[in-house]
Amino acid sequence: MRRVIIIGLVFLTGCLSGATSPSSITTIQVASNVSQLGVFAGDQIQLNAQALDAAGDVVPVAFTFASSNHSVATVDVNGLISVISAGSTTITVATAGRSSNFTLTVDGNISNAVQLTPPSATIAPGQSIQLAAVVITTLGNPARGKTVNWSTSDATKVSVDNAGNIHGIVSSPGVTVCATAADATSVKGCATIVVQPPAGASSR
């Protein structure tokens, strides 16, 4: 009987020595699936938190989540953020007296610039290419749900349709083709299109 008791004590001590507790937490790491293309109203973002001890091992604990600005975004008990409007908020992730902050900036989707690809091109009479237009917001992100209107400085030499398809008509040292944000007529991007016949061919 005495031997059995000693073995039991040794086993219990070993279990306790390898255990971790919330007081051993030194770091809280917070990861998210936030898009590199910006955050906009209506988005949802999932936060995933881990508590680590001094050795870098995970400490199993529960977390609380709180938003500093509920008009911008709310967060539920599982770390799921629901984005409501443009602005900034700080999501605080906490456990066992320690916390980590996740800063969220929500784009207002305001048109600020239009980027054209390619920004210039040389084509032959009769040749067609397509330009791609992306509206950029004031925060530098690709805008969502924006359209552009296309125009050409000389439709007798270079034409453009509503999809940005460019068609060379006759030789020209340069025609300006622009895409203007439909919701902001002062916001545009332009490309220079040179029309010249292939080497050895005569111009029309």
Image (tube, grey):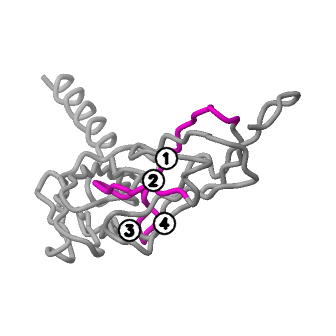
Residue 111 circle label: 3
Q: Give the residue drawn at x 54%, y 52%.
A: 155
Q: Is residue 16 above or below residue 184?
A: above
User: In the visual, does 159 lie left or right of 40?
Assistant: right
Regarding residue 101, the answer to whether it shows in the image is: no
Give the mark toward the camera: 3 or 1: 1
Mark 2 or mark 1: which is in front? 1
Q: Point out which mark residue 134 bears.
A: 2
Residues at discs 2 and 1 in contact (Cβ within 8 Å):
no
Of residues 110 and 11, which is closer to you in this image? 110
Magenta-colored span: 124-152
Looking at the figure, which quarter contains the N terminus? top left
Q: On the picture, is 168 further left or further right than 174? A: left
Alpha carbon of mark 3 to alpha carbon of mark 2: how far?
A: 10 Å
Sequence-wise, the earlier of marks 2 and 4 is 2
Residue positioned 68% across, 45% down in the render = 121
For the point 31% across and 55% down, the residue is 144
The amino acid type found where label 3 is placed reads Ser
Q: Amino acid at mark 4?
A: Lys
Badge 2 or badge 1: first in the primary sequence: 2
Locate the C terminus and report the quarter of the image it occupies: top right
Give the vertical position of 49 relative to 99 (above or below): above
Q: Residue 128's spot in the image, x, y percent? A: 57, 34
Residue annotated with mark 4: 188
The residue where tag 1 is placed is 160
